[in-house]
Image (cartoon, rainbow, N blue to C red):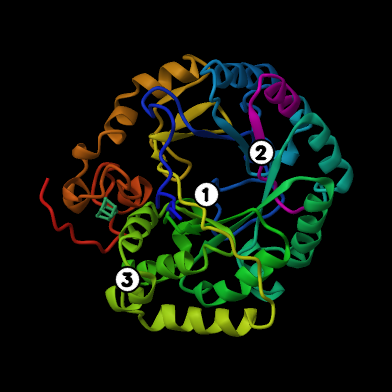
């Protein structure tokens, strides 16, 4: 029998210079939570200069104009549920053939009624944030008591209404030890995709402590260890793809010899085994991470219509109020540079994994002011000179 091994990284089926794989649109910055790590520095009320409903519809027209395969569209915030025209926008995108997903905050606005209305309008997936394993850690992270319990309730509702559920978890040095417990909850909730976000010191996230590069390496290996339990997305840690490729070349029994298990991974592994013992979670073939990066298959549109390579890389490349989105995406000099891994500085520019990883451009920018600089959150030393 021939055994077919899936590739460790999924490649886009189209030219990333021509069209994005996914576009995130921040429909508003308004939000009733005051999370300690908020990228958007969210505020309580809506900005009067937000893209209007008509402008939003035009943006969705622009995204659909790429043709098949059309980009995935995620409507985020702030809290997208603060916009009363959200069902209209979702229905418009769906009619155009776009796959629409939503990233709401857990507030009183997230009700079964609204979830049903948006599902009827065509939304397919909802992502919710879970940054701690208990009410104590999650609520203090989110700045509001009771959000943990409300999130558990919302996640169940999301599944019952028929959405795919994505859980987003921000990892900091304070919360990293809770990852096994969060994983257990992620599995219990029937999550389709667990997005683990490696904090970029931008927005209110500057107040939190990110992992060191060595700790991040340990956590990424642990995530790969558990990737047969749930699909994993390592947000702002594209070197997860480097790790996936490195591990694919090693026999399963030799992994710990080739990639020695440090104290943090040993702790995460031990606690995972204890927490999941007797549960027998369903195992599947791990879903390989997809090869997209800031400006290369990925773009972000803010609440007033400015386009960015990522929501965590605050260098605007143009307003959709003045130019079409495809024009900005294809012609922006910065986006073109971000799609050229040979243009990267330091280790990333010399790295043999640069075309499939390329480093977190947001981490590079947040620490050096240069989006093309080396990614300091990766500890890899390239072995092949460019
Ligand atoms: S050095 Fe840069 S390109 Fe190479 S694996 Fe690390 S982050 Fe990726």
3D distance between C-alphas at marks 2 and 3:
33 Å
Circle 2 SS class: strand
Q: Based on the picture, tell me whether residue 160 belongs to the magenta stretch.
A: no
Pointer 2 residue Cβ closer than 8 Å to ligand 1: no
Picture layout, residue 1 above or below residue 312: below
Q: How many circles with numbers are drawn on the protein? A: 3
3D distance between C-alphas at marks 1 and 2:
19 Å
The residue that label 3 is drawn on is: 214
Circle 3 SS class: helix
3D distance between C-alphas at marks 1 and 3:
24 Å
Query: Which one is earlier in the sequence, the residue at label 1 or at label 2?
Result: 1
**Residue at image coords 55%, 83%:** 271
Check if mark 2's residue and mark 3's residue have beta carbons within 8 Å.
Answer: no
In the displayed structure image, the side of residue 309 where residue 369 appears, left or right: left
Picture layout, residue 44 above or below residue 179: above
Q: Nearer the viewer, residue 345 or 354?
A: 354
Check if mark 1's residue and mark 3's residue have beta carbons within 8 Å.
Answer: no
Q: Based on the picture, tell me whether residue 100 belongs to the magenta stretch.
A: yes
The residue that label 2 is drawn on is: 101
Quadrant containing the C terminus in the rendered view: top left
The residue that label 1 is drawn on is: 39
Pointer 1 residue Cβ closer than 8 Å to ligand 1: no
**Residue at image coords 64%, 44%:** 78
Q: What range of the chain is rendered magenta?
A: 89-107
Q: Quadrant of residue 13?
A: top left
Image depth: mark 1 or mark 2 in front:
2
Residue 240 location (% of width, % of height): 39, 57
**Residue at image coords 39%, 84%:** 263
Image depth: mark 1 or mark 3 in front:
3
**Residue at image coords 26%, 64%:** 379
């Amino acid at each position: 029998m021939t055994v077919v091994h899936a590739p460790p990284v999924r490649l886009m089926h189209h030219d990333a210079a021509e069209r994005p794989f996914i576009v995130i649109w921040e429909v508003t910055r308004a939000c009733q939570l005051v999370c300690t790590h908020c990228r958007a520095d969210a505020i309580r009320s809506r900005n009067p200069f937000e893209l209007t409903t008509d402008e939003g519809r035009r943006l969705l027209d622009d995204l659909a104009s790429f043709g098949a395969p059309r980009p995935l569209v995620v409507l985020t915030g702030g809290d997208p549920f603060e916009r009363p025209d959200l069902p209209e926008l979702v229905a418009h995108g769906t009619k155009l053939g776009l796959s629409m997903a939503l990233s709401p905050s857990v507030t009183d606005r997230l009700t079964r009624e609204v979830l049903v209305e948006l599902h009827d309008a065509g939304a397919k997936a909802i992502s919710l944030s879970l940054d701690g394993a208990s009410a104590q850690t999650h609520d203090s992270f989110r700045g509001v008591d009771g959000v943990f319990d409300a999130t558990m309730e919302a996640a169940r509702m999301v599944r019952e209404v028929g959405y795919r559920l994505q859980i987003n978890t921000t990892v900091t040095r304070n919360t990293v030890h809770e990852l096994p417990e969060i994983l257990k909850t992620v599995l219990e909730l029937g999550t389709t995709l667990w997005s683990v976000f490696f904090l970029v010191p931008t927005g209110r996230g500057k107040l939190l402590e990110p992992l060191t590069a060595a700790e991040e390496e340990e956590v990424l290996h642990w995530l790969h260890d558990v990737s047969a339990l749930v699909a994993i997305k390592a947000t702002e840690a594209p070197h997860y793809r480097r790790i996936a490729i490195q591990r694919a070349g090693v026999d399963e029994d030799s992994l710990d010899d080739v990639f020695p298990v440090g104290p943090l991974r040993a702790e995460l592994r031990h606690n995972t085994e204890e927490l999941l013992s007797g549960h027998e979670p369903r195992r599947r073939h791990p879903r390989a991470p997809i090869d997209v990066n800031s400006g290369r298959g990925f773009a972000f549109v803010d609440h007033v219509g400015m386009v960015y390579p990522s929501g965590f890389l605050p260098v605007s490349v143009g307003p959709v109020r003045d130019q079409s989105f495809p024009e900005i995406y294809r012609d922006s000099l910065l986006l073109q540079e971000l799609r050229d891994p040979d243009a990267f500085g330091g280790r990333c520019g010399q790295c043999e994994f640069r075309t499939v990883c390329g480093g977190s451009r947001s981490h590079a920018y947040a620490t050096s002011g240069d989006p093309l600089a080396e990614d300091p959150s990766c500890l890899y030393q390239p072995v092949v000179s460019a």
